[in-house]
Amino acid sequence: MTTLHSVGWRVHPSFVPHGPVAPVTLLADDEGLTQLAGVYPVAWRTPWSEIANLALVRRGSRMVLAATVDGRRVEWRRRGLEDYEAVRALVEERGGSVSRVSRRRWVALGVVGAVMVASLGGVLGALLHHGPGPLSGPTASAGAQLTGRDLPPGWSATPTGLLSFLDPPAGAVDPVTTTTPLSVDLVTPRVVARFQSCLGVSASADRVFGGAAQLPEVQVTSPIYHRVRPAETELVTVAQVYATTTMVRRDVAEMSRPHFGACFAAASASLLESTFTGQLTLARGASSFTPRTFARGWARGGVVPLHLPGVTRPYVLVVVVVAGGHDETTLNFVTPTWPADRSLVAGLVGTLKARIGGRDAAA
């Protein structure tokens, strides 16, 4: 049995609300996995019987270790490969998967979308509303995104919830490489092939999941915004800024194909559901949705039902991409009160269109 003592990790989400996420040391032996988190380490010991779906992904000099821990998906990330072989051996011994992702593939998995996952345990509210996590510093002006001021009364920022596996955290900016997260279960060729077949584009020419994907100069994630009434609802935006307007125009050309909204929403839901359940799931019932707004600009979107174990309410995932100039922003919205929220989503998309138009005019 391979043992492990590896330092320098960061965990997401924290094991308890507001708990430490870094620095993390991982220890493993025959009995289970131990995480020591925080400057003054707090230990969590988990037996192997409560750990499933182990997976390790390497991308360049970074690695991601993911597992379902007592029914909840957890990811540990680390820069540097000093302990890669030991982690790989441990994962393989436990029947997990090991893969390597190229820089281009890493970008492609999230170039216009944000993938969400959480363990609901039948009660969405248990994961929601843990206090604000506002943007600050230079990240607040990077990209076209939504803030709390754009939302009606009753919404608040929260650091965790249904969308808490969206990475990077609120305010994170990486001007060199994409910071779109890689959830290891999302590397699903059947989902990607299904999207490309739906859209009618080859793998090599696909700018969303395929060989033609490109790298943004800057990417910023908003806080997760949460609404309690009339039902537990969340939204988040991912703003990306590209070096040239030509890059965005080429993306828009692909995303303007018929049925893009439905195809992309179905792919996003498939990835979400596959990660949640630990097995490949292909979402059904997606439809295109392009909200009408007073603001001028380009947008495409889709709506798809979500089918998650333990969740009985009819939640849907709404995904809308807004683009123009140097900017591409994705709005992800999860709600059980659709289509009552159509006007709210349309208003938010109009705000993003105006914001992108304003940035383009000022450039």
Image (spheres, helix red, strand yellow):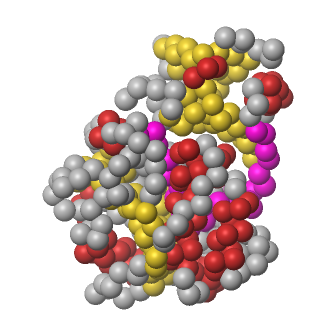
Magenta stretch in the rendered image: 97-120
> Is 61 in front, or is 314?
314
Above or below: residue 319 compared with residue 61: below
Which residue does the image show at 46% across and 79% down from the upper left? Answer: 288
* Residue 90 image point, x, y percent: 77, 24
Q: Position of residue 83 (x, y in %)?
A: 78, 26
Question: Residue 276 placed where, x, y %?
Answer: 53, 45
User: Eyeballing the image, is 333 above or below 173?
Assistant: below
Q: Quick check: 81 above or below 339?
A: above
Quadrant in which the N terminus appears: top right
Q: Compared to 213, does 130 lie above or below?
A: above
Q: Is residue 322 magenta?
A: no
Identified at 66% across, 62% down, the residue is 191
Foreground residue among 94 and 246: 94
Left or right side of 357 for 4: right
Residue at 53% x, 20% y: name it.
37
Q: How many marks?
A: 0
Q: Nearer the viewer, residue 216 or 329?
A: 329
Residue 255 visible at all: yes
Left or right: where 354 falls relative to 330: left
Q: Is residue 117 located in the magenta-colored stretch of the structure? A: yes
Q: Is residue 178 left or right of residue 315?
A: right
Where residue 293 appears, x then y in whole percent?
Answer: 31, 84
* Residue 136 relative to residue 256: left or right: left
The answer to whether residue 181 is seen in the rendering is no
For image coordinates 19% across by 62% down, the residue present is 152
